[in-house]
Image: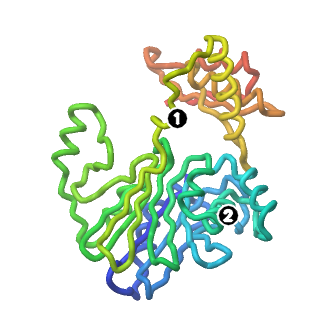
Amino acid sequence: MCGLAGILYFHKSYNEDQLSKKMINQLNHRGPDYTGHWSQKNDGIFLSHSRLSIIDVSNFGNQPMISNSNRWVMVFNGEIYNYKQLKQNINNLHNIKFKGNSDSEVLLNYFDLYGVDETLKKIDGMFAIGLWDNINKSLYLIRDRAGEKPLYYYKDENSLFFASELKALKIVPNFNKKLSKEALNYYFKIGFIPSDECIYQNVKKIIPGEYVEFVKNSKEIKKKKYWKVEDYINNNSKKSLNDEINITENLLNRSVKERLNADVPIGTLLSGGIDSSLVSYYAQKNSLKKINTYCVGFYNKNYDETEKSKKISQYLNTNHTNINV
């Protein structure tokens, strides 16, 4: 994972850029490999990023990242699983020279060539994105379809602050820490806080499958739900049980295979239960060498799963590690 933080001052330029840096310093645990900053003080925009290097660990994958046209500046947390296919599409149609091999650079070039809406139709991944448009002077905050990657924002009369975690927002001067009664009500009733609500009254979450656009010199906030699971449900399916099983297996296999792209060692968390055992099975099936599997166990045997995970790891022939706490 990586960390994002940024500020947009709506009605003025701003000469002091230490706050964005202080915000991202709260998120160094999310990305210890590199910390980067970009600002355009005349527009009052500040972007910061803490990087965990997974794909293309060279400096060419560092962020904030600026597009070839200089129109877009991006901070991105996540992974685009189909980035190699997207890169090939770009190479087939456009004369663009890539500096590195990161999925971040491919994503940014897609935004540059096709715009926000078309890019979000094409990409397959998990992500939280802060994207600045130098032409229209607007900031997009974008979250993936399932909401795997977190993204919060805090807005007052003159400013917008966003970050991957609340702790980066809490150091903003005059941040209002008043608790949201509505959010508390949700939490005690259903055990979590849904929708765009947050435990703090004046903080919102970008919801899954949504982007929000904030325009400089404007109080207008544009929200768009770019993906809905309901649009992909076929209520008239007449497939047999065996067909459905084969479709599910192919989807699982493809999904796990796509997630094995990395330039660093990878592994799976294996508890011995159905979900983690399936993921580990398809990961080992699609790997040319033994994968690493891990299980966190407990000395209290009523809660311990290490024996189950050990049996599955032996069956799958993985490099297995049990860690007791």
* Residue for badge 2: 105
CA–CA distance between discs 2 and 1?
Answer: 29 Å
To which residue does mark 1 refer?
232
Q: Going from the N terminus, do you reach mark 2 or mark 1 first?
A: 2
Q: Amino acid at mark 2?
A: Glu
Position in image of residue 137 (x %, y %): 45, 78
Q: Is residue 289 left or right of residue 325?
A: right
Neighbour class for label 1 at 10 Å: few (<14), some, many (≥20)?
few
Q: Residue at position x 67%, y 40% from top?
A: 259
Q: Secondary structure at mark 1?
A: helix
Q: Is residue 253 left or right of residue 210?
A: right
Which residue is at the far left?
181
Q: Please tell me which residue is depicted at 62% across the width and 61% down the height of the picture.
A: 33
Name the residue at 70% across, 40% down.
Answer: 258
The image quadrant of residue 250 is top right
In the rendering, at what x and y percent does residue 264 appear?
72, 49
**Horizontal placement of 218 versus 258: left or right?**
left
Residue 69: name its quadrant. bottom right
Q: Amino acid at mark 1?
A: Tyr
Q: Position of residue 153 (x, y in %)?
A: 35, 61
Q: Is residue 320 visible?
A: no
Seen from the viewer's position, the closer of residues 187 and 83 is: 83
Relative to 288, is 186 on the left or the right?
left
- For residue 60, which quarter of the picture? bottom right
Looking at the image, is 275 positioned above or below residue 177? above
Name the spot of residue 81 as percent of width and height, x first. 66, 46
Q: Secondary structure at mark 2?
A: helix
